[in-house]
Amino acid sequence: MMWAVMMAAMMLPSALPMIQAFTQVCRKRTKTPSRLSYIFTSAYLWVWLVFSVVLTLLQWQMHGLGWLSPMMDNQNTAMAAGILFLAGSYQFMPIKNACLTHCKTPMGFLLNEWQEGSRGAFHMGLKHGASCVGCCWAQMLIMFAVGVMNLLAMALITLLVIFEKSMPLESKLICKAVGMAFFAWGFLLLTS
């Protein structure tokens, strides 16, 4: 439950433009826009809940290896640097850019993926949630590097996700800049 709450708290702010765009379109097309928006948002959060289960299993494994303290703080510098290098590398991958581009254009998503009714809202929420996970999964792993319950890190990662999705700059440029920052951070950990 902890991971599910963290993922919802970190990802819902960045999903608000998509949810608002979905609600606006629903207002013009149906008599029950709030119900469909609820279904869309619930499906989106369901995808993050599934991802939270994966993170929980990973956390248990890291506890078993002694890489995380009982307070969920990182105890392994090499693991933390490895996570930062993984997150940095992912920023350069075409799939990251494709998912980010998808997340940055709510109306484009709605025009291309629109499906009518409750089932359509659910499918669209799942698809948007999957795209969002595809965009941000590596950034969420950084919580293992900085301490799972680090509230400042949660806030900074949330702001990073919002920044990536809302900046008018081309997605590739943002991805590469963030990737370089993750690489630099990882090297700093290894050399300090």
Image: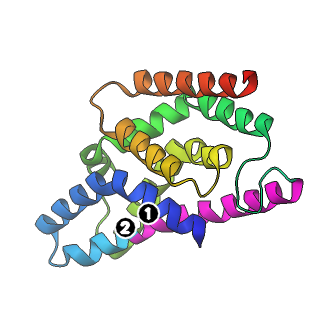
Q: Is 60 in the magenta?
A: yes
Would residue 164 be found to the left or right of residue 34 on screen? Answer: right
Numbered badge on residue 44: 1
**Label 2 to label 1, Cα distance in Å?**
5 Å
For the residue labelled by badge 2, is the local secondary structure a helix, a strand or a loop?
Answer: helix
Q: Main secondary structure of the magenta part?
A: helix
User: Badge 2: how crowded within 10 Å, few (<14), some, or many (20+)?
Assistant: many
Q: Which quadrant holds residue 64? A: bottom right
Q: Is residue 121 visible?
A: yes
For the residue labelled by badge 1, is the local secondary structure a helix, a strand or a loop?
Answer: helix
The three-letter code of the residue at mark 1 reads Tyr
Q: Residue 188: x percent and y percent?
A: 66, 23
Q: Residue 59: x percent and y percent?
A: 74, 58
Q: Residue 125: x percent and y percent?
A: 40, 62
Quadrant location, the C terminus: top right
Q: Which quadrant holds residue 81? A: top right
Position above or below: 176 against 73: above
The three-letter code of the residue at mark 2 reads Thr
Position above or below: 44 against 142: below
Which residue lies under the disc numbered 2?
41
Query: Looking at the image, which is closer to me, 33 or 190?
Result: 190
Would residue 147 be found to the left or right of residue 40 on screen? Answer: right
Q: Residue 24: x percent and y percent?
A: 16, 61
Q: What's drawn in magenta, residue-wise? A: 42-65
Q: Is residue 47 visible?
A: no
- Whether label 2 touches label 1, CB < 8 Å: yes
Give the residue displayed 77% in from the left and 53% down from the top.
68
Would residue 190 be found to the left or right of residue 8 on screen? Answer: right
